[in-house]
Amino acid sequence: MTVHLSLLCLLSLAPLSVIAEKITHDYCIVGAGPAGLQLGFFLNRDGHDYVIFEKSDVAGSFFAKYPRHRQLISINKRFTGRYNKEFNLRHDWNSLMSDDDDLLFGKYSEEYFPDADDYLKYLADYQRKLGINVKFNTEVSNISQSQQKGCKFEMQDQHENNYCCKRVLVIANGISDPIVSHGVGHDLIEGYESMSVNPKEFDGQSVLIFGRGNSALETAKSLYGHAAYLNLASRSRLRFSWDTHYVGDIRGINNEVLDSYHLKSLDGILEGMSIEEVDIVRRTDGKLDLIPNKKSHISLEDMDHNPVRHGYDRILRCIGFQWDKSLFNANTTPALSKTSSGKYPLMGTDYQSLQFPGMYFAGALAHSLDWRKSAGGFIHGFRYT
Ligand SMILES: *[C@@H]1O[C@H](CO)[C@@H](O)[C@H](O)[C@H]1NC(C)=O
């Protein structure tokens, strides 16, 4: 018994001494996606003291789950007819920069619109072959500006390790949190993050998809050979990349379903109805009904002339992703930039936080500066930014 007691004492003392000691690095990067790895490559090559914190056990974990139907919309342009590496890379939407010609994504897939699993393999090889220092299964939180001399930022991980970043902190955790709606009856809606991706489960059903981006169109594409009625509902008009030249808008690869819409088949698109404007109720016949709520500018009368009056077997939510900023301490939480519709963090033209000197943003977050203007939110875009 006495032996047990003294052991307990030792165990309870041990974590205290670990907490007091901070693990220190000059450069800390949060997130081992394409941006984090790319930065890691350059910091590694130049011999800097850096670490990349990755909450999951793989690099680019977003791609382990998304896109749900596994086909990327980033072009795998393997042949350009040119030998200039720089020129070729400009037309390659997926590869990261390195000195190793085997680490080009074209070596991993022959598909023009590649499979996300191949991209995972590519990122894993990139990290391993180049010896990039990623600390996997390490979820940092409570990121705060440090009061301690020689420390700019500090943070903890789930194993109660404490870290001190001496020079630069780079936030590269992407835009990967599904946006959820909270209206009345919205628990009856299935989200993109958890819905079934087996199209057979939708055979003969009437299905409504909220959303007007590529995740909504990708989902529609997988279902239109199975559902009896397939409607898309969105707040505003669909925007097509072939009109806008913006790669974030709806891409040609998702065009098939629009074809059936334009040919006046049973499928349709309802513009001007957002998920926030409707309550969902289950009717006695089991179908789901949409009821305009107080936020809605659609009247019940309008609804009578609307295809939604027939009700749906299933309603899916594919309205996009948001930035997860829960990893910051309350007094070090970055503000959002108004010019990017409040979706991206506020930053200067050098990608540095305007509030917290030494904090930078990379990858999809860097799209704050060229949102809806250029390709900075996409791998081939931010590779250069
Ligand atoms: C968060 O970090 C601050 C120091 O920056 C520390 O005082 C505080 O105890 C931490 N909070 C938690 C919940 O760990």
Image (spheres, grey):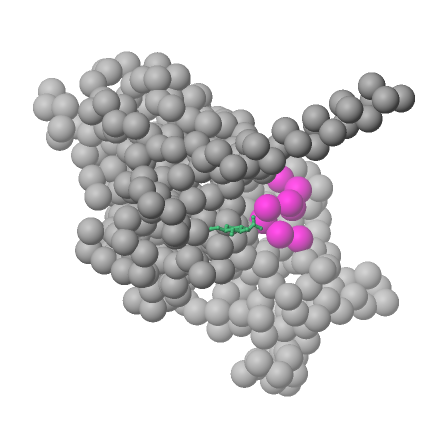
On the image, the x and y values in percent for residue 268 come to 53, 61
Taking the image as shown, residue 343 lies to the left or right of residue 7, namely left
Q: Is residue 376 magenta?
A: no
Residue at image coords 35%, 54%: 249
Q: Is residue 109 above or below residue 242?
A: above
Rendered-image quadrant of the N terminus:
top right
Q: Is residue 135 above or below residue 62?
A: above
Of 20 and 110, nearer the camera is: 20
Rendered-image quadrant of the C terminus:
top left
Of 150 and 220, nearer the camera is: 150
Of 152 and 364, nearer the camera is: 152
Spot the residue most to the right: 1
Of 50 and 5, nearer the camera is: 5
Residue at image coords 38%, 47%: 148
- Asked whether residue 373 appears in the rendered view, the answer is no
Q: Main secondary structure of the magenta part?
A: loop
On the image, the x and y values in percent for residue 157 come to 53, 38
Taking the image as shown, residue 185 lies to the left or right of residue 95, namely right
Residue at image coords 28%, 48%: 358
On the image, the x and y values in percent for residue 339 come to 30, 67
Residue at image coords 36%, 58%: 345
On the image, the x and y values in percent for residue 234 come to 50, 65
- Asked whether residue 3 appears in the rendered view, the answer is yes
Q: Which residues are magenta?
A: 190-197
Taking the image as shown, residue 65 lies to the left or right of residue 252, namely right
Q: Is residue 195 magenta?
A: yes
Taking the image as shown, residue 2 lies to the left or right of residue 87, namely right
